[in-house]
Image (cartoon, rainbow, N blue to C red):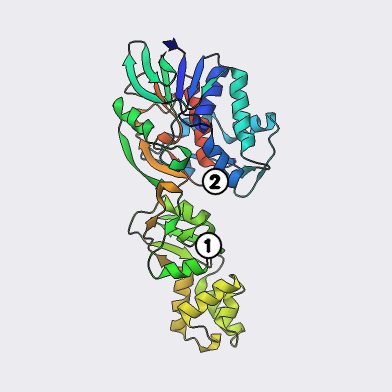
Amino acid sequence: MRSTDVVIIGAGAAGLMCALTAAARGRQVLLIDHSNKAGKKILMSGGGRCNFTNMYTDPANFFSQNPHFCKSALARYTAWDFIAMASKHGVPYHEKKLGQLFCDNKSRDILEMLLEECRQAGVELHLNTSVQQIEKTEAGYLLSTGLGPIASPSLVVATGGLSIPTLGATGFGYEIARQFGHTVLATRAGLVPFIITDQLKDLCAELSGTSVACLVSCNDQSFRENLLFTHRGLSGPAILQISSFWHPGDAVEINLLPDHDALEWLQGQQSARPNSELKTLLGEVFTKKMATLLADDWFASKPMKQYTPAGLRDIADKLGAWQVVPAGTEGYRTAELTLGGVDTRDVSSKTMESLKSPGLYFVGEVLDVSGHLGGFNFQWAWASGYAAAQFI
């Protein structure tokens, strides 16, 4: 049997950060993962360019049944701390918008940086390594693994959630939590596209690939971003954001004219250009194809002067407050995030240590802490991993 100061299960963002930080403190760290590669989610994130943090990270960008839990860790390891590491390694990056920082080149730059930090600190990384059993002992934890039995006083669960199972996501972290007396709150897919199956499906398919700026609202939450039509329904940043607050049966309100009061704009156009057709005017706001489809299918396009006041109000209602009831989401298959997870009320917000089983820690997505789209979930991974590493 081998022994070590710390065993970390999961070589994703949170696990790598926890490992390199703990090892830099002089701890003997064994980092294991059942996958054949470390940081698979890092590699595919941000379209292959990794939206690795957000300059405007704030607790308000996160949601949890215990909303104050994230504050301590986020305050102790900020976006600027991670930016400093990236700068030290010469990783080129840029702000895309709204504080979102992306690699100039590719996501691998971030992964290689983390792996290099692990190498320099002496982290022992083992991939393709399964964990069959975990037992609590007087001295800590005994793991039965593909490497044989391993004993350690500290065990860190950095296994992530259920999102994108093709990358190796499983519910193993939740099983560990339950084994040691933790409550696991109901999980569901977040930051995920909607599926449309009603009469709007044909419209979505016709407009597949079309992107439009909009304001999307549901359950007292609103996001101003782009919407993307797909063959299956609706996607794009605005939809991914609002999906985390949507529940089956809820209507999603979409304002396709977020820069205008829809009725005032239509009345102004009618007054200034009475002979222009509706589809012509919409073509100045949307793509020509989208303008034609909306004008013909929704409103029976005609010259503006032929619309009555009531007719204009109907058009304004549809463009400014389009009501869509999705049939569902694409689920964990394409979700960027798993909502819910290990109940943080039984975890120390300072140390990430279990309040049920001393020496057991939870970091990253396995916890019931979920961020908005835009680099926030990576920042939670860095911050929570760093926080646990100070105490293991």
* Inter-mark Cα distance, 2 to 1: 17 Å
- Residue 386 seen in this snapshot: no
Residue 378, x across and y down, in percent: 53, 37
Residue 50 in the image: above or below residue 132: below
Residue at 62% across / 19% down in the picture?
120
Residue 140 in the image: above or below residue 57: above
Quarter of the figure with the N terminus: top left
* Quarter of the image where one finds residue 83: top right
Left or right: 304 as drawn, with respect to 323:
right
The amino acid beneath tag 1 is Cys
Element on which disc 1 rests: strand
Residue at 60% across / 44% down in the picture?
48
* Camera-side residue of 327 and 359: 327
* Camera-side residue of 156 and 67: 156
Q: Mark 2 points at which residue?
A: 374
Residue 223 in the image: above or below residue 358: below
Element on which disc 2 rests: loop
Q: Mark 1 points at which residue?
A: 214
Local packing at callout 1 (Cα closer than 10 Å; few below 14, some 14-19, many 20+) is many
Residue at 35% across / 54% down in the picture?
247
The amino acid beneath tag 2 is Gly
N-term-proximal mark, 2 vs 1? 1
Residue at 43% across / 83% down in the picture?
310
- Residue 34 seen in this snapshot: yes
Residue 72, x across and y down, in percent: 47, 30
Left or right: 366 as drawn, with respect to 257:
left
Residue 80, x across and y down, in percent: 61, 34
Left or right: 150 as drawn, with respect to 119:
left
